[in-house]
Amino acid sequence: MPKRPPGQPRGDQRWSTFLKNHATAILACDFFIAVTATFRMLYALVVIEHGTRRLAHVNVTAHPSADWTLQQLREVVDASDEHKYLIHDRDRIVAKHLDDSIRALGVEVLRSPLASPKANAICERVIGTIRRECLDWMIPMSEAHLRSILRRWVAHYNGGRPHSALGPGVPDPPRRSVRALKSESRHRLAAGALVLAKSVLGGLHHEYRLAAAPADA
């Protein structure tokens, strides 16, 4: 293959440049394995939006297949017209007819290169976060139990866990009255404001939010 002369620009954009330019339209998915207390192996599919860092879909199965995976992806792709690209690796579960079906929905499928986990870095990173912040501390008893754990953790990840890539911020910020809770100092609570704590997964994590104090009777 002929090599590009030194100093001559590339004729196309780099992978990292493509991801930045089209982040709001990109979905990425990948599988990871979890083991139950009875040493049963389960497979979890994760689908994340690049632009918002929102976990769009997570589900669990003991018997992964192309048809099952296709149904999961359809639930995400059909929900919005904003998704234009889907990134996944070259796992044998993701068969050719699955890609063809996704393309028929108007989404272009991009397969990452062989042995290149960094090409799907955002999805790989969130799987590592799920392990470090959730499954390393909890042992699922069954498929239903694992699905319940992940459902609660995903709600925390999307609505309560801060993300440095977002400012920091959260993918689904809660609605609140900023005017009523506005403070003159960044180091002091506004008058009449309270800090409410919410326990997640039995105290594994906590979420905090401001609320107006109830009026005195």
Image (tube, rainbow, N blue to C red):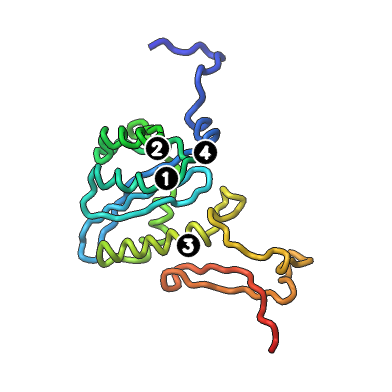
Disc 1 marks a residue whose amino acid type is: Cys
Disc 2 marks a residue whose amino acid type is: Ile
Instruction: Report the Cα–Cα distance between label 1 and label 3.
Output: 17 Å
Instruction: Report the Cα–Cα distance between label 3 and label 2.
Output: 24 Å
Q: Nearer the viewer, residue 2 or 190?
A: 190
Disc 3 marks a residue whose amino acid type is: His
Q: Quadrant of residue 196?
A: bottom right
Q: Quadrant of the N terminus?
A: top left
Q: First in sequence, mark 4 or 1: give its number.
A: 4
For disc 4, the marked residue is: 23
Q: What x and y, as percent, mark residue 118?
A: 42, 38
For disc 2, the marked residue is: 87
Q: First in sequence, mark 1 or 3: give its number.
A: 1
Instruction: Report the Cα–Cα distance between label 4 and label 1.
Output: 13 Å
Q: What x and y, as percent, mark residue 4?
A: 48, 13
Q: Is residue 132 left or right of residue 34?
A: right
Q: Are marks 4 and 1 in contact (CB under 8 Å)?
A: no
Q: First in sequence, mark 4 or 2: give its number.
A: 4
Tell me what residue is drawn at x 32 percent, y 61 percent: 147
Q: Are marks 1 and 2 in contact (CB under 8 Å)?
A: yes
Q: What x and y, as percent, mark residue 105?
A: 37, 36
Instruction: Report the Cα–Cα distance between label 4 and label 3.
Output: 22 Å
Indicate the secondary structure of the residue bearing disc 1. helix
Q: Are marks 1 and 3 in contact (CB under 8 Å)?
A: no
Q: Nearer the viewer, residue 57 or 205?
A: 57
Q: First in sequence, mark 1 or 2: give its number.
A: 2
Instruction: Report the Cα–Cα distance between label 4 and label 2.
Output: 11 Å
Tell me what residue is drawn at x 42 percent, y 62 percent: 153
For disc 1, the marked residue is: 123
User: Which of labels 1 and 2 is toward the front?
Assistant: 2
For disc 3, the marked residue is: 156
Tell me what residue is drawn at x 26 percent, y 67 percent: 141
